[in-house]
Image (tube, rainbow, N blue to C red):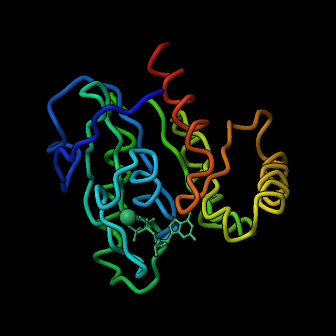
Amino acid sequence: MIIKTAEYSISSPTVGQCPNDTKNEFAFIGRSNVGKSSLINMLCRHRGLAKTSATPGKTLMINHFIINKEWYLVDLPGYGFAKRSKTVQQKLEQMIAGYILQRQQLVCTFVLIDVRHDPQLIDREFIDWLGESNIPFAIIFTKADKLGIVKARAAASAWMEKMRDRWEELPPYFITSSDKAIGRDEVLDYIESINNE
Ligand code: GTP
Ligand code: MG
């Protein structure tokens, strides 16, 4: 798929304030600092479109970006950032859960996992919650450049194998690097296939 235009639309504090629009939405979620905002910029080839930071906790709202004037990419705050106050953490979790459970336009949630990390409880719980809630999702491994592609592929497939004890069918998964633009075509083709359904 070719991205002709990618524009910032709006930042919303609640699902009720998201754009009044029926276009398909694809959301990015995962631990703070995993690379959600960087991945959106890489997919759009637009540095600075979504705000990124070396310090976790940068994204704090539901951020919509409209692509080719036809569909949206949605950047969400990260989960599992221990340095936040309980109140802030709870507010963000409500924002994320409200958006994911209530947004009819959300056709796929991409769960991002740092390819260097072994499965963590918080990711497992989040993925199980998506499954129980019947939310369609796929997994995106990030920062493949930090391991090199060969090791990244092995780590990703080992990670997926560990899901087998809980899941009969494994979701699709992608290996990416926002620094090296690895996995861009694969993710965009997957989005296109859903848009064409
Ligand atoms: P929050 O919004 O805070 O939840 O974080 P985020 O998931 O949006 O992460 P963000 O895109 O802001 O990236 C966090 C840090 O990881 C930044 O310093 C990025 O430069 C770095 N980073 C993101 N993707 C990659 C990647 O593919 N490779 C490398 N080497 N660094 C990356
Ligand atoms: Mg972010």
Left or right, residue 192 beside residue 90 = right
The residue shown at (55%, 43%) is: 184
The residue shown at (32%, 64%) is: 92
Q: Number of marks in the image?
A: 0
* Vertical arrangement, residue 124 with respect to residue 170, above or below: below
In the image, 22 versus 35, the foreground residue is 35
Left or right, residue 58 beside residue 129 = left
Residue 13's x, y, as percent?
19, 56
The residue shown at (40%, 82%) is: 55
In the image, 87 versus 192, the foreground residue is 192
For residue 26, what is the image quadrant? top left
In the image, 140 versus 61, the foreground residue is 140
Residue 40's x, y, as percent?
41, 51
Left or right, residue 196 beside residue 104 = right
Residue 16's x, y, as percent?
17, 42
The residue shown at (55%, 50%) is: 111
* Vertical arrangement, residue 136 with respect to residue 89, above or below: above
* Vertical arrangement, residue 186 with respect to residue 54, above or below: above
In the image, 80 versus 150, the foreground residue is 150
Quarter of image, ligand 2: bottom left
Q: Residue furthest top?
A: 197
